[in-house]
Amino acid sequence: MRPLDIQTTYQEMIERGLSPRTIRYTHAVLRSALRQALQWRLLLDNPVDGVKIPQHLRGEMRSLTVEQAQAFLKAALPTPHGPVVAVALTTGMRPSEYLALKWQDLDWSRQTVSVVRSVRRLDGRWCFSDTKRSRSRRPIRLQSWIVSLLRDLRTKASAQGSYSEAHDLVFRTPSGQPINADYLAKQFRSILDLAGVPRLRLYDLRHSAATIALAAGVSPKVVSEQLGHASTAFTWDTYAHVLPHMQDEAAARVEAMLFGAKA
C-alpha cells in the first residue's frame, strides 16, 4: 500500500458524494491500524503520512429553525409520510434506524423506542443488521404526541390486517417492505416545498432534532445519548454553533442566583 493508493481512494470517496467527516473518520481508523502494524514491525513506514484529507465544511450541515419545523410538520402530518418524518424530526434517529423500527421496539408504558437495528438496500435485497456499537443501541424517549401518532398508525395497520407485534415494521410499503430512503427523500422534498421552507437533505432532520433540542436548553449529554454519538465531545464539536446561545442563558441564570436578578 502506497500513499498514492490511499489518496486515490479518498478522492474516489469524494466523487461518490461521501462527506468530509466520513473520509476523516476512515482516515483516523486506517491511521490507527497502520500505526499498530508499525509497532509490530509489519511495516517500515506509515503510508498515511503526508496524505491530505478534506477539511470539515460546516456548510454541509443544515437544519430547520423552530418556525420552519412547525411549518414543515403542519404540511407533513396530513400526508401518508407524516408519521415517519415526524419521528425523524423529534428523535434524531438516522434514516437507516427509523426505517428499521418494528412494533416490538416500542415501550408504550414508558413512551420510549429502542434503537437496536438498521436496514439498507444491498444488491437488490433488504438487509437488516443489529446495531453493533454500544452507543448506537439506545432507548429514546418519545414526545407524547408522537406516541399518539404511532398508536393511530398501529390501529390502522391492525384494521387492515397487517399488524403483528413481533415482526412488522412500523413504517412500511403497502406490500410490507421497508420504505426506500431515496423514495422517502423525494417525498420529503415535496413536503418541504409545500411548507415553503428551504430544501434540505432527509438526513438533515437528524441535525434539526439536535439543534432544536440544544437551542431549547437540553443538555448536550442528553442530546448525545439520544443521537447515539460516540461521545459528548463529538456532539459539542458538531453543534458548536448552538452552544454560545446556551452559554449566554447559563451565565444569566447563574447571575440571577448570585445576585437575585431576574434571568
Image: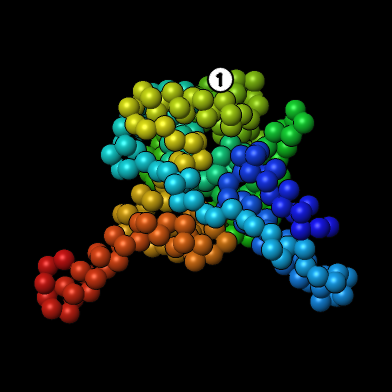
Task: Tell me the residue at 31%/32% (across/down).
Answer: 71
Asked whether, in this view, residue 95 is left or right of residue 192, the answer is: right
Q: Nearer the viewer, residue 215 or 222?
A: 215
Q: Which residue is mark 1?
A: 160
Residue shown at 68% from the left, 55% from the top: 26
Residue 160, percent across and down?
56, 20
Locate residue 126, reporting x and y percent.
Answer: 72, 33
Considering depth in this image, is 171 or 15 the residue closer to the camera?
15
The residue lying at 40 percent from left, 60 percent from top is: 240
- The amino acid beneath tag 1 is Gln
Q: Tell me, what colour scheme is on the image? A: rainbow
Q: Can residue 103 be seen from the camera position used here?
A: no
228 relative to 151, above or below? below
- Residue 84: x and y in percent read 49, 33
Q: Residue at x 24, y 71 (%)?
A: 251
Quadrant of the image for the C terminus?
A: bottom left
Residue 3 sits in quarter: bottom right
In the image, residue 93 above or below residue 167: below
Quarter holding the N terminus is bottom right
Residue 261, visible in the rendered structure: yes
- Residue extending farthest to the bottom is 258
Q: Is residue 118 left or right of residue 81?
A: right
